[in-house]
Image (cartoon, grey):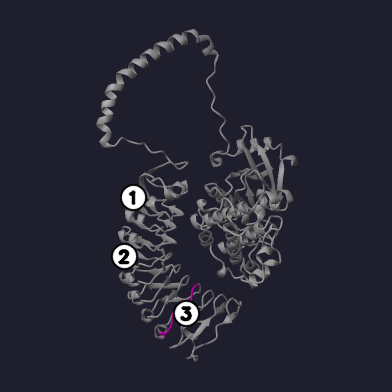
Amino acid sequence: MVGSNFTGPIPSFKNCSELRRLRLEHNQLTGNLDEAFGVYPNLTYIDLSDNKLTGNLSPNWGKCKSLTKLSIATNMVTGEIPKEITQLKNLVVLDLSFNNFSGLIPENIGDLSSLSSLQLQGNRQLSGNIPLDIGNLSNLESLDLSMNKIEGSIPKQIGDCSRLRNLSLSTNRLNGSIPYEIGNILSLHDLLDLSNNSLVGEIPSSLGKLMHLERLSLSHNHLSGEIPNSLKDMMGLVSINLSFNNLSGSLPSGGAFDKAQLQDFVNNTDLCGNIEGMQKCYVSMAESKNKRWQNLVIILVPTIVSTLVFSLILFGVISWFRRDKDTKRSNPKRGPKSPFENLWEYDGKIVYDDIIEAAEHFDDKYCIGAGGSGKVYKVEMSSGDVFAVKKLNFWDSDMGMENLKSFKSEVATLTEIRHRNIVKLYGFCSRGEHTFLVYDFIERGCLWEVLRSEEKAIEVDWVKRVEIVKGVAEALCYLHHDCVPAIVHRDVTSKNVLLDVDFEAHVADFGTARFLKFDASHSTGVVGTHGYMAPELAYTNKVTEKCDVYSFGVVSLEVLMGRHPGEALLSLQSSPQKGIEMKELLDSRLAYPRRGKLLSELSSLVSIAISCVQADPQLRPTMYSVCHQMGLRKSAFIREESV
């Protein structure tokens, strides 16, 4: 009865005293939780998540002594979490996330000695402190208390959770410093997220011991001091976000810091480093070298002064002989400044006129593509810069003032996005009769056209296709998990994936799809392209990251098959583990890969893509999970086929 889309009241199970296992997740069942259930001594597993259940969580659940999993995530259950829950000594999974629970986390939560996963995130009204005996959960592997109103300091006892792989305490009201003991949780692997709190003090150098940790986010706090140099030794780190703090000093070099981008460190007090856009560090001599430097100065100064005097005399003589020529020579001019270094600093008129002139009023000879929202033109400016300009079909008056304001505000935000696999958006111009967006020009055009050209498709070998899929995955993972708030693309298709000269993928039209699909005569909340849209959008207007995940799965299969998967999607959804041979999912225009790393990599991508196109959004992985499964690091990319 999982995901059967059942509606109506949940049946009463109060008289089913021999109930042992019940799964009703991913339906639309309603009703009062505590009225539908009683006490079940033999019940081991119950999952009621993703329904519309209300009521309270009854203390009677504490009498179901055999329970190993209790999940009622994503419902509308209210009230406090009963302390009787802590009597369930066999409980392995407790998932009460995304409900409306209030009050405190039970203080004896540490009594759940078998607990492996504790998910209380997204209740918003959970308050109070993190119980000190949380450290007694020696089997805990995943702890998520994010998006609540939990306050106080992070207890140092959390460092005793020696098996923890995932720890998220973000978006609460936590204060105090980060406990040094967190650095002792050497098992931390997937995520350490303490962002969006009020933490103070320095970042503990002990975090550098978390060698296997992949994602670290401490952004939006009040942390101060320098970034510990030990963090560069975190060899597993894929992403790090320390933005919006009071950090200062120089950025460590090495490890994840060499791959980091400016937005990971913005809005700090006085950070410096070698990242593009960040202020450079001024290097001072160490104390131990001062004396040697002073001795060197004593020797060099007379020599330098003599040389300077001689040079000045020589310069004066040469200048006298060349006076006439020099007076005729104008001062060297500065090179032309790109009109799009920061489009939002202009009133738009100069930029608008320059583009109109360069595109000859959008003459069709410059058109390189067209879609439902407008045409795309290749525009070469007088400075030599080349841009892709998307001329939109709608007028300001069609869109409405409120939508136009929202659109401009969103585009202004999107211009701040920086990622190697995302097409740079410079800004938006709307004057006179034309309205357009200005993007980086990506040389080879869209993936859709490349795959449909026999000649071009053969040029995109298996190694390049693996990298294309990974590039799209990295872009979406960045939009979903590294941007605050998260950005949902809404229209991931092979036409919105562009390839540069090296066949590296760049995702275009991110974040603006809901505006660009605007139709004044009949506007809906659903946007996307047929064949790529997640199936749930047929009955709901709610667009989530999981919709992008589905579209990513379709594009991934399209890259591997060389064509849109079409009806094969139904087979892959109904029988993901069988029914279709590997050869049927690989482009026959390319030679079938020999056994070895490449074939293994392709097989893994096929499995990941299939998991992404599952009809039930809850069964799809997140883009972070996708990247994790791909082992995404540039150095891990396959560069050549091995036997």
| Mark 3 / mark 1, whichever is N-terminal | 3
- Report whether 271 appears left or right of 588: left
Comes first in the chain, label 3 or label 2: 3
Q: Position of residue 98 (x, y in %)?
A: 48, 70
Placement of 148 over or under 114, stated as above or below: above
Q: How far apart are marks 2 and 1 (CA)?
A: 20 Å
Whole-Å distance between the Cαs marked 3 and 1?
Answer: 44 Å
Q: Nearer the viewer, mark 3 or mark 1?
A: 1
- Residue type indicated by callout 2: Pro
Q: Residues within 10 Å of mark 2 (few under 14, many from 20)?
A: many
Which tag, 2 or 1, sits closer to the chain's start?
2
Quarter-of-image position of residue 107:
bottom left
Residue at horizontal 33 percent and vertical 61 percent from the top: 184
Name the residue nearer the viewer: 345 or 273. Answer: 273
Q: Nearer the viewer, residue 317 or 173?
A: 317
Can you give x and y, in whole percent of width and height, for residue 170 in the image?
A: 41, 61
| Tag 1: amino acid | Ser
Q: Which-is-in-front pick, marks 3 and 2?
A: 2
Mark 3 lies on residue: 55
Label 2, secondary structure: give it: loop
* Numbered tag placed on residue 224 in the rendering: 1
> From the image, which quarter does the N terminus lie in?
bottom right
Answer with left or right where residue 435 lies relative to residue 477. right
Q: Where is residue 198 in the image (x, y as percent from the top left)?
A: 36, 57
Q: Name which residue type carries label 3.
A: Gly
Provide the residue span drawn in magenta: 64-73
Name the residue beneath numbered marker 2: 155
Give the CA separation, mark 3 to mark 2.
32 Å
**Is residue 318 visible to us here?**
yes
